[in-house]
Image (tube, grey):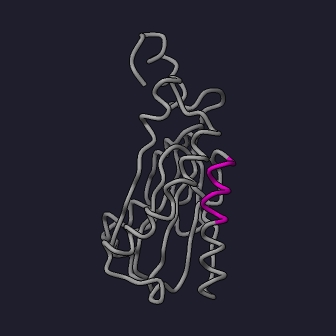
Amino acid sequence: MIVLGIETSCDETAAAIVTGDGEILADVVRSQLDQHRPYGGVVPELAARAHLECIDGLISQALSEAQVTFAEVDAIAATGGPGLIGGVIVGVMTGKAIAATRKVPFMAINHLEGHALSARLSDRSLEFPYLLLLVSGGHCQLLIVEGVGGYRRLGTTIDDALGEAFDKVARMLGLDY
């Protein structure tokens, strides 16, 4: 099985080609740092537009790097949330359009679950259960990952997430975005 993965939940556009065995054949990321730097942070509308401008080319690049054609793709997965809604819509609609055209399954993936399970893609010896500190955007959680779909939250922030606090302190110190 070969899966095309699409990630557009914040300010980076990504496409990956992954086998059913978890082998990453290609992983392509396009940063939007330069577009958001003048504003000192991510501007959701600009992020969504930037995703729309580059998603097709990024998917083509991932397929090329993986030496895979659309005809060989068995399923499409895209981040379905949480995230900035404009960006999420770009990724989901692109994925659904490709899946409908190719007549292959489409799966919306929870962004946080993707983070929780991605450790197993880079370390195939990692077995369930494992302890995970998940720090992503507005989320900061300490989890026991028991299996796919099985998570026990040991703790979470109750006000600002670590990433948001980091951004606020950086702005107060006059550091560049």
Residue 123 quadrant: bottom left
- Outermost residue on the top side: it is 173
Q: Is residue 57 left or right of residue 123?
A: right
Looking at the rendering, the stretch of residues picked out in magenta corresponds to 85-93
154 or 44: which is nearer to us? 44
83 or 59: which is nearer to us? 59
62 or 111: which is nearer to us? 62
Against 127, residue 48 (above or below) is: above
Residue for point 53% across, 53% down? 53
Residue 99 quadrant: bottom right
Tell me the quadrant of the picture where the C terminus can be found.
top left
Task: Give the x, y percent position of residue 76.
Answer: 56, 76
Predominant secondary structure, magenta span = helix
Against 132, residue 28 (above or below) is: below
Task: Give the x, y percent position of residue 154.
Answer: 57, 45
Q: How many labels sit on residues?
A: 0
Task: Give the x, y percent position of residue 10.
Answer: 55, 45
101 or 132: which is nearer to us? 101
Q: Is residue 163 left or right of residue 27?
A: right
Tell me the quadrant of the picture where the N terminus can be found.
bottom left
Against 41, residue 78 (above or below) is: below
On whether residue 117 falls in the magenta region, the answer is no
Residue 120 quadrant: bottom left
Task: Give the x, y percent position of residue 65.
Answer: 30, 72
Residue for point 65% across, 27% down? 159
